[in-house]
Image (cartoon, helix red, strand yellow):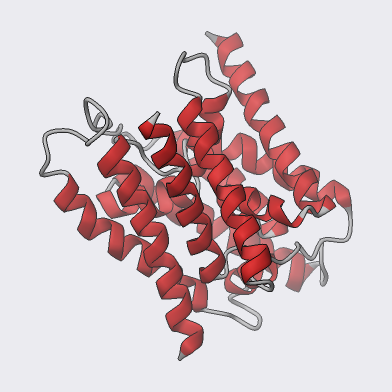
């Protein structure tokens, strides 16, 4: 129960960070990606703030034997760079560049109740379900 | 100057959120991974995922009422582009195992080579996509 509460609060904090940083304004995101046009570099600061903070805290957290509310930290991630990783990231980048939403800001922007964000999140979830179904069928 | 300090502060909040989730729950704050896992078959693993996503929405509602202007809408003319983009983001993030948060923030902070490669890849294709849409096709999607 505690872990569910923590996750909810982390989601709220994450959303506030996205909003403050400008990630929930697709125009701003696209201006950041438009390096050949009126480039808006401010979103690079979001990345620096996020990576800077997490990189420092991560090292302190990892000194603990385990998380506070769970038995262990996530297993060391795979290190292999493969085709799936590169192809998946490439497809994701195209979608992000078309509309200006990546998954976090899209969920947060559902709060606007706008038709566009609803369509985007709906098809994003459909894409995830399709992928899960496809990879289950392969196994 | 303020236009750079606010994004830095926003980023720090994102980093803090990811740190709290790791410290307390031992989970990675990758939004596509958290959302994708909702459709997985692992029992007892859905609650925290749905809570995090609900928190994202709750934070959005707070922003909407306390700080209007932080939430924009995509400058897209046709609903089909939203569907295509959504599908690409959904399939792409599952195939590549992460998005801007999981790879870009958590993975890069950890120094993961996979995440560095993924981040450089999606940054490159996103920049290329915006270039083609705006400067080759000469308009919004």
Residue A121 in the image, given as x and y percentages of width and height: 71, 43
Q: Nearer the viewer, residue A7 or A42?
A: A7
Q: Is residue B118 visible?
A: no
B134 up-or-down from A66: above or below: below
Residue drawn at x 29%, y 54% is B109
Q: In the displayed orientation, state which residue is furthest to the bottom.
A: B1
Relative horizontal placement of residue B8, taking residue A88 as reference (left or right): left
Q: Which of the two residues, A54 or A29, is positioned nearer the viewer here? A: A54
Q: Observer-nearest residue: B8 or B133?
A: B8
Residue beneath the point at 75% across and 62% down: B74
- The residue at 56%/41% (across/down) is B53
**Residue A130 seen in render:** yes
- Residue A94 in the image, given as x and y percentages of width and height: 64, 52
Instruction: Give the residue at x 56% y 47%.
Output: A90
Quarter the N terminus of chain A occupies: top left
Q: Is residue A86 above or below residue A40?
A: above
Instruction: Give residue A107's position: percent from left, percent from top.
Output: 63, 48
Please provide percent x and percent y for residue B45.
45, 22
Note whether B117 is above or below B48 in the view shown: below
How many numbered tags mark residues here? 0
């Amino acid at each position: 129960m505690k872990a569910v509460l923590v996750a909810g609060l982390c989601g709220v904090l994450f959303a506030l960070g996205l909003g403050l940083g400008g990630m929930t304004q697709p125009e701003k995101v696209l201006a950041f990606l438009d390096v050949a046009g009126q480039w808006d570099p401010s979103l690079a600061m979001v990345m620096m703030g996020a990576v800077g903070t997490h990189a420092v805290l991560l090292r302190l957290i990892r000194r603990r034997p385990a998380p506070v509310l769970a038995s262990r930290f996530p297993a060391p991630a795979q290190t292999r760079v493969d085709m799936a990783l590169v192809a998946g990231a490439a497809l994701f980048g195209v979608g992000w560049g078309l509309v200006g939403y990546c998954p976090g800001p899209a969920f947060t922007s559902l709060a606007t109740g706008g038709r566009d964000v609803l369509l985007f999140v709906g098809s994003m979830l459909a894409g995830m379900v399709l992928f899960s179904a496809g990879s289950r069928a392969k196994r | 100057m303020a236009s750079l300090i606010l994004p830095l502060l926003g980023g720090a909040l994102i980093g803090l959120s990811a740190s709290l989730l790791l410290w307390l729950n031992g989970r990675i704050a990758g939004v596509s991974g958290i959302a994708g896992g909702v459709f997985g078959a692992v029992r007892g693993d859905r609650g925290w995922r749905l809570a995090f996503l609900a928190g994202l929405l709750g934070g959005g509602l707070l922003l909407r009422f306390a700080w209007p202007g932080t939430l924009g809408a995509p400058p897209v003319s046709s609903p089909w582009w939203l569907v295509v983009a959504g599908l690409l983001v959904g399939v792409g993030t599952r195939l590549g195992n992460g998005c801007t948060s999981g790879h870009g923030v958590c993975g890069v902070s950890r120094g993961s080579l996979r995440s560095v490669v993924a981040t450089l890849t999606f940054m490159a294709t996103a920049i290329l996509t915006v270039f083609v849409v705006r400067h080759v096709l000469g308009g919004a999607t």
